[in-house]
Amino acid sequence: MKSYPGEDKVKRLLLNHQWDDAKRLLEEVFTVSDTSGALNDLALICSRTGEWKRALELMELAMKKPDRDIRTDVNYFYISELSGLNRSRGEDARSRVLELKVGDESYEPKLSIVMRTFNRGALIKEAIRSVFEQSFKDWELIIVNDGGDKDVEKTLESIWDRRMVYAYARHSGPAGSFNVGLRLARGAMLGFLDDDDYVYPDHWARLMSHMERHPESNAVYSDINLVWLDLKTGRIKRIKSHQAGEFKREKLWTGFYLMNLLTMVIRRECLKRMPGFLEGLRSAVDWEFMLALSHYINFDYISKPAGELRYWEGLSQVGKRSVIDRNHQRNLVLYYHGITPFYRFTLGKNTLDEKFLQLLDRLLQKYPELMRGLEMRKLLNEHPYSVFYQLGSELLKQGNKQEARQCLHCARALAPKEIKVLIKLLWSYLG
């Protein structure tokens, strides 16, 4: 893509999230320069400001320009997908509730904890027990069964509490079930817990105390422990402590575990600005929700583990999504929020050189399906070889050796001195 007049100023505006100002400037540029670069950048900004039809029209024009390159192709793919994405945020979520059981309809809790569940009757009891063991007692636990089997109801019968709410709803996916819970919440504060995770006894007491002492705060989060367990024995196989650190909006672009919903409390009034989770996504819904909230609020941080984000090895529903599907969903989030590296000038720390673009072009010509699998957030603050290396490593784990080797060869071409790339490449032939 050729450069266009004023692109340095456009980049500064975008880095400062001044979308409307960048759009006005590019509209002026467009009258004198309709290169693929100008069309490409204006289309990406239009998608960020919700003008999906116009964004797609601009990308279609950009695709016809002689100076287009692989960036145009990738952008056209994602803008096309986003133009048809379900962008609702649970406005009709309450109507999806088919059965509802409320422990005490007159109860007015301070904290509403939303728990989604789907065919996890064997695991949910320990997650609920961790709520019962909280030193903070003024909560309600809203359990949303996302159209799964009803084995969970047998567990709930044996431990039912007046502070519990159970909703059986039509299946609507991870975002949809969260939105059902949000519409049922009665507390001034909101917390979250999945049915296979675990919170430590003082977690919500610490966060609620912070919010009471700081009425100006909209949200607070803390650290988390990542725990891998054997499904059959319950034995802990590995623990990794994740220290989230102080909130910086830019870290959300690249750090998938900067914050986790389990660690967080937000004021319910924030839903007036951001009503819920984006229902068109199949995964990365919590990350998108925090990105969306970050446009309106800041987050306070407390340095102490909230609980355990658990990975049950042997559970078919956990961790089995393909790398291509996972990265595809994350890329949709980046494009939805305008945080894409494929502007004419790129965003983030890197300037994408011609060699990277040529390697990417050759790879996608040979394996066009890999366009969905590029983890493009890595281009925002890591060396470009990491995009190829990450995808190649994950494909190798899944047994896709041919595609993995091609990705790893691209990584080695960009970073010939990186020993881990060479080792992984050799392993793809010998392993």
Image (tube, rainbow, N blue to C red):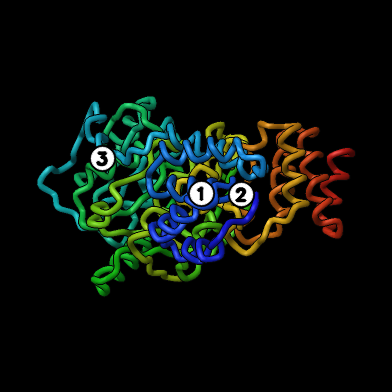
Q: Which residue is mark 3?
A: 160
Discs 3/2, front: 2
**Disc 3 versus disc 2: distance between alpha carbons?**
45 Å
| Label ID, residue 128 | none
Q: Amino acid at mark 1?
A: Leu
x 21%, y 53%: residue: 187
Disc 1 to disc 2: CB gap under 8 Å: yes
Q: Amino acid at mark 3?
A: Trp
Please tell me which of labels 1 and 2 falls first in the chain: 1
Q: Quadrant of residue 20?
A: bottom left
Disc 1 to disc 3: CB gap under 8 Å: no
Q: Quadrant of residue 254?
A: bottom right
In depth, the one of 287 and 99 nearer the eye is 287
Helix, strand or loop for disc 1: helix
Q: Which residue is mark 1?
A: 334
**Residue 369 to residue 291: above or below:** above
Dot 2 alpha-carbon crowd within 10 angstroms: few under 14, some 14 to 19, many 20 or more: many
Discs 1/3, front: 1
**Residue 93 to residue 331: above or below:** above
Query: Is residue 234 among what the camera can see?
Result: yes
Judge left or right: residue 325 versus residue 359.
Answer: left
In depth, the one of 280 and 51 nearer the eye is 51
Judge left or right: residue 181 versus residue 35.
Answer: left
x 49%, y 48%: residue: 44
Query: Horizontal and vertical percent for residue 229?
Result: 58, 45
Q: Which residue is mark 2?
A: 376
Helix, strand or loop for disc 3: loop
In depth, the one of 123 and 82 nearer the eye is 82
